């Protein structure tokens, strides 16, 4: 019924087909359970880009479905850091490892966190801590700064309801034990 109402409103407002599709998708995800809405938001917000290790295949990089959202694989060392001068004002802004789970830049080396509900991930977190982290750009809302390339400032613009849905989804996925290394400061 809600979709029919949205379609009717769109017809009256002379929406383009793309606007009508977007409104229908927005309504469909709004009607979904928090976990399903969270799955949609995590999938469309690029979380897998850094928080899921990759596999190499004939089509190039793909998501390693056995390690979804488990962060940088702690058992895999990062490659040697780039030579001095490669990253900086006259060079590259940042470089990532082959999984895109570890990044090197002027801030040092950052590792994508384990977002699964394991003790090495988000098990002890609450939705309030998750929201505070996304709003402040600080670990657990008041800890160390979240380092690039994590786009927390984009997620900060989401509603509390959307962030709660993302957290609900993250709490529903399989636990993966993976203690991600602590960030390395510049020059270490």
Image (cartoon, rainbow, N blue to C red):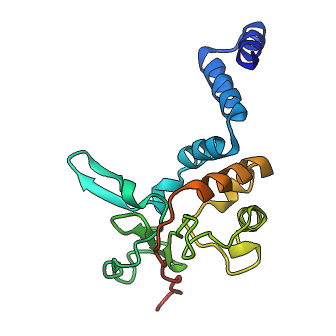
Q: Position of residue 134 (x, y in %)?
A: 71, 62
Residue at 73% in and 14% down: 10
User: In this picture, is 175 found above or below 167?
Assistant: below
Residue 63 versus residue 127: which sits nearer the camera? 127
Left or right: residue 144 compared with residue 91: right
Residue 46 versus residue 153: which sits nearer the camera? 46
Q: Is residue 126 visible?
A: yes
Q: Looking at this rendering, what residue extends furthest in the left direction?
A: 58
Q: Position of residue 104 (x, y in %)?
A: 45, 75
Q: Looking at this rendering, what residue extends furthest in the bottom direction?
A: 188
- Residue 140 position by quadrant: bottom right
Left or right: residue 132 compared with residue 46: right
Residue at 41% in and 78% down: 74
Label tally: 0
Q: Position of residue 67 (x, y in %)?
A: 41, 61
Q: Is residue 159 visible?
A: no
- Residue 137 position by quadrant: bottom right
Picture quarter with the N terminus? top right
Left or right: residue 53 compared with residue 128: left
Residue at 73% in and 53% down: 164
Residue 188 versus residue 69: which sits nearer the camera? 69
Q: Position of residue 102 (x, y in %)?
A: 44, 71
Residue 160 versus residue 176: which sits nearer the camera? 176
């Amino acid at each position: 019924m809600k979709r029919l109402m949205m379609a009717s409103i769109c017809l009256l407002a002379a929406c383009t087909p793309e606007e009508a599709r977007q409104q229908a998708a927005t309504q469909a995800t709004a009607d979904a359970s928090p976990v399903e809405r969270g799955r949609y938001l995590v999938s469309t917000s690029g979380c897998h880009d850094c928080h899921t290790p990759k596999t190499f295949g004939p089509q190039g990089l793909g998501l390693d479905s056995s390690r979804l959202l488990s962060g940088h694989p702690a058992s895999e060392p990062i490659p040697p850091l780039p030579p001095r001068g490669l990253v900086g004002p006259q060079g590259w802004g940042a470089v990532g490892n082959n999984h895109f789970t570890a990044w090197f830049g002027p801030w040092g080396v950052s590792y994508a966190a384990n977002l699964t509900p394991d003790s090495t991930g988000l098990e002890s977190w609450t939705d309030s801590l998750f929201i505070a982290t996304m709003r402040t750009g600080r670990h657990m809302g008041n800890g160390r700064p979240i380092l690039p390339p994590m786009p927390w400032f984009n997620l900060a613009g989401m509603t509390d309801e959307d962030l709660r849905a993302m957290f609900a989804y993250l709490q529903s996925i399989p636990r993966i034990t993976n203690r991600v290394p602590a960030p390395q400061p510049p020059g270490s």
